Image: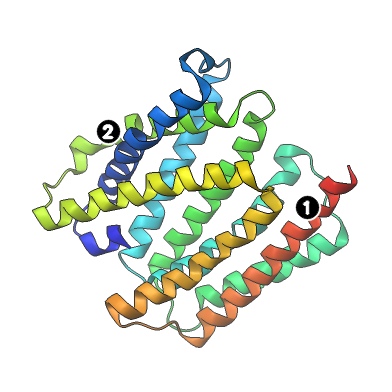
Amino acid sequence: MFVKLAGPEYSPFQAVFFRNAIATVMVVPLIFYAAGPTSFRTTRPMGHFVRALFGVAGNASFYYAYSMIPMSDGMSIAMSVPIFTALLAIPFLGEKVGLRRWVAIAIGFAGVMIALDPTGDFQVGSLYALFGTLCWAASLILIKQLSATETPYLIVFYYMITGVAVSLLILPFVWITPTTEHLIFYICAGLVGGLGQILMTFAMKFAPAAVVTPFEYTAICWAVLFDLLIWNVLPDLTTVLGAGIVIATGLYIWHRETRVLTVK
């Protein structure tokens, strides 16, 4: 919301830099405090780097998408990340998918197509949101691979540091000095981004992932609220219908994965 308020004249990588840099200042000291400075050695630097690249690309794609389309439209597509993650887990993690989840994935893709609305008021920004969702799903797959040997502290730490470094390399080619008002928006984006990381970390610490994960779907409610209050925009019927299908199938896939883990 804050990045969208700053306006479309700025590069999305400029938003990524402010978001990551400010969040890093907030989160990294807490990681050092919780894990200690000696626990940040890794034997998989390339894995962290590739994960960070997908994270930066995903953030930039979403920021660019939201400069062109309502937040509720982009978030409707973003909620399909469990569907894409389940699909990517087949070749990259060797996970087996039963008939029920295949049906859920197919229905989820139908929901994505409805949300994209290719036969109606289709906008290019929706494709950027879709690409950002694919990057997000790929990032989750890489996190699963890294978590076999790396701690959550390591994964967050190297993502923050690498994300800042990558966006800083791109920044000289796209930099536009923001106005004071827009700079405040970028700082706020970094603050809420860092706060979100902290709160999610504590949520995962005090409650099982199966309890925490469904709350991520409330993001679409906040997107609709921001669209209405700030830009006086309401989602159309295809967006609502597509989002409903995507959320329902995403929750079903999450439920099936939870049952499989419980059985194991």
Of label 1 and label 2, which has the lower sequence position?
A: 2
Mark 2 residue element: helix
- Residue 10 x/y as whole percent: 21, 54
Residue 82 percent coordinates (x, y):
65, 56
Q: Is residue 136 above or below residue 72?
A: above
Q: Is residue 108 above or below residue 175?
A: below
Query: Residue at horizontal 40%, vertical 30%?
Result: 28
Residue beneath the point at 79% across and 61% down: 102
Label 1 element class: helix
Q: Residues within 10 Å of mark 2 (few under 14, many from 20)?
A: some
Where residue 244 sits, quadrant-wise, is bottom right
Q: As shown in the figure, which amino acid type bears the numbered disc 1? A: Glu
Q: Which residue is the extreme one toward the bottom?
A: 237
Residue under numbered circle 2: 168
Residue 257's label in the rendered image is: 1
Q: Position of residue 151 (x, y in %)?
A: 60, 27
- Residue at screen point 20% across, 43% down: 174
Tell me the residue at 52%/23% (across/down): 35
In the picture, which quadrant includes the C terminus? Answer: top right
Q: Amino acid at mark 2?
A: Leu
Q: Residue 179: tell me if it is visible.
A: no
